[in-house]
Amino acid sequence: MRKTRYAAAAMAAAAALTLSACGGDSGSESADSAGGETIRVGIKFDQPGLGFDEGGSYSGFDVDVAKYVAGELGFSEDQIEWIETPSAQRENMLENDQVDMIFATYSITDTRKEKVGFAGPYFVAGQDLLVRSDNDDIKGPEDLNGKNLCSVTGSTSAQKIKDTLASEVNLMEQPSYAECVTAMQGGSIDAVTTDDIILAGLASTEANKGQFKVVGNTFSEEQYGVGIQKGSDKCEDINAAIQKMIDDGAWEEAIKANTEGADYTFNASLNPPTPADCA
Amino acid sequence: MEGFLELFGEYDVVGAFWVNIQLTFWAGIWSLVLGTVLAIMRISPIASLRWFGTAYVNIFRNTPLTIIMVFGALALWSQLQVSLSSDFNLNFFRLAILSLSVYHAAFVCEAIRSGVNTVPLGQAEAARSIGLSFLPAAWLIILPQAFRGAIAPLGNVLIALAKNTTVAATASVAEASGLMKTMIEFRPDLMTQIFLTFALGFVLIVIPIGLLTTWASKKLAVAR
């Protein structure tokens, strides 16, 4: 008798789980019927100043551009479904149709173009250095002799240091830039390196304000594009939206708002970029 | 197939897996030593030692390995400036071995304790009756039999350890999972080949460990 009671309880629990799974699905369906279609936008959730999850709402330059572009494509803000797209999963998520557009510090490269399509670029970043604000020794990559550097495991920035400066610098690799900044706060790391706008975003968070500065001497060029499915028909519309955002000043405003307090100015000789032709 | 050749030509895949094997080897030895000491504590007649062994196992078995690893890199090294080597990269390698050993020692301890349970109580009573005190009795009579009964669970711990070495990427060790991220960053066009390379790589490392420990546990089992 007791056994059957346990079995019944287990069945009920299992049923509850199944039902709650259904509940999740029907939730998004009802959103569909209320306001027409939704668009799935992939962003980073852990990069302050670019794409950052603030507990249900999202902030950053990538997010602002995504909202503007989605608006031009005819989607209001509550029709955007934000999805996290970590660096290593971006191509797969586009290929498997899990997202419609990706705004996630996504550099346009030839090998990526074999898998996915790109609209844009909407920003040209460059690899730079973030140092403590009282550090005046490091003005560019040539001052890094014998210094301890930090970057993210498997990133383009880390590889660039390994390829060009490996004999002179010590490179620490961490899962994300937040850990790098923590290590720099501890004093064991002299500089964090990656794209300038990512560094500016890190330096302008509430917790880090005033502690760090971006050196402002870029030594690479990264064209941030909008990742879309290969052969997607959205490319031209996205490019038109980016051009419009640049022309009406919203683009520059978004950069300023998201890097406030970091003492950062974007590389004006390369920005704002002109979106490339769609293939 | 061409894709595989390209990947192996462009990246040092074997070298990266070699780092994982080295981590497994050193952390395996240190966790075995530490785990054995803990197991002796847990079966000892002194209450405070038993309490310490139990507390260690419960704390470290229930703490995620990633947290221990991050603690090693960010708290021990970065904040407290604890350094295990003057060489920048060797320091991280040793910190990773330390974290892996501290974590897996808890599992090794429990595996050995399960081996102790296979030794009949009469063995301990016989040892005491010929005048051996606790440590000689444990070292000469109980543990040799316990190890022979604990080879299969110890093999499980070793297999888990081999796969857990990928967490060392968190402590800035350039091992296989870090290389995989680099490869995905630069060669997303060869995604399938990259996935298969690393999946098969770990299968190749883990299957021999499994075969060896299964064979050894049968061969060395105490016939009763």
Image (cartoon, grey):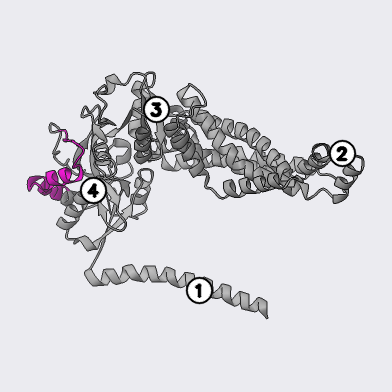
Magenta residues, as a range? A239-267
Give the residue displayed 56% in from the left and 41% down from the top: B163
Q: Earlier in the sequence, mark 1 or mark 3?
A: 1
- Distance, label 3 to label 2, CA atoms, is 55 Å
The three-letter amino acid code for the residue at tag 3 is Leu
For disc 4, the marked residue is: A60
Q: Residues within 10 Å of mark 1 (few under 14, many from 20)?
A: few
Looking at the image, can residue A229 be seen?
no
- Distance, label 1 to label 4, CA atoms, is 40 Å
Chain bearing tag 4 is A
Q: Which numbered dot is residue A171? A: 3
For disc 1, the marked residue is: A15
Give the residue displayed 68% in from the left and 41% down from the top: B38
- Labels 3 and 2 touching (C-beta < 8 A): no
Q: Secondary structure at mark 4?
A: loop
Q: Secondary structure at mark 1?
A: helix
Query: Residue A206: percent from the left, percent from the top?
Result: 26, 45
Q: Which numbered dot is residue A90? A: none
Q: Secondary structure at mark 2?
A: loop
Confirm whether circles 2 and 4 share one chain: no
Viewer-closest of B74 and B205 = B74
Residue lying farthest right?
Answer: B130
Query: Residue A9: percent from the left, percent from the top?
Result: 57, 75
The three-letter amino acid code for the residue at tag 1 is Ala
In the image, is B206 to the left or to the right of A113? right
- Distance, label 4 to label 3, CA atoms, is 28 Å
For disc 2, the marked residue is: B132
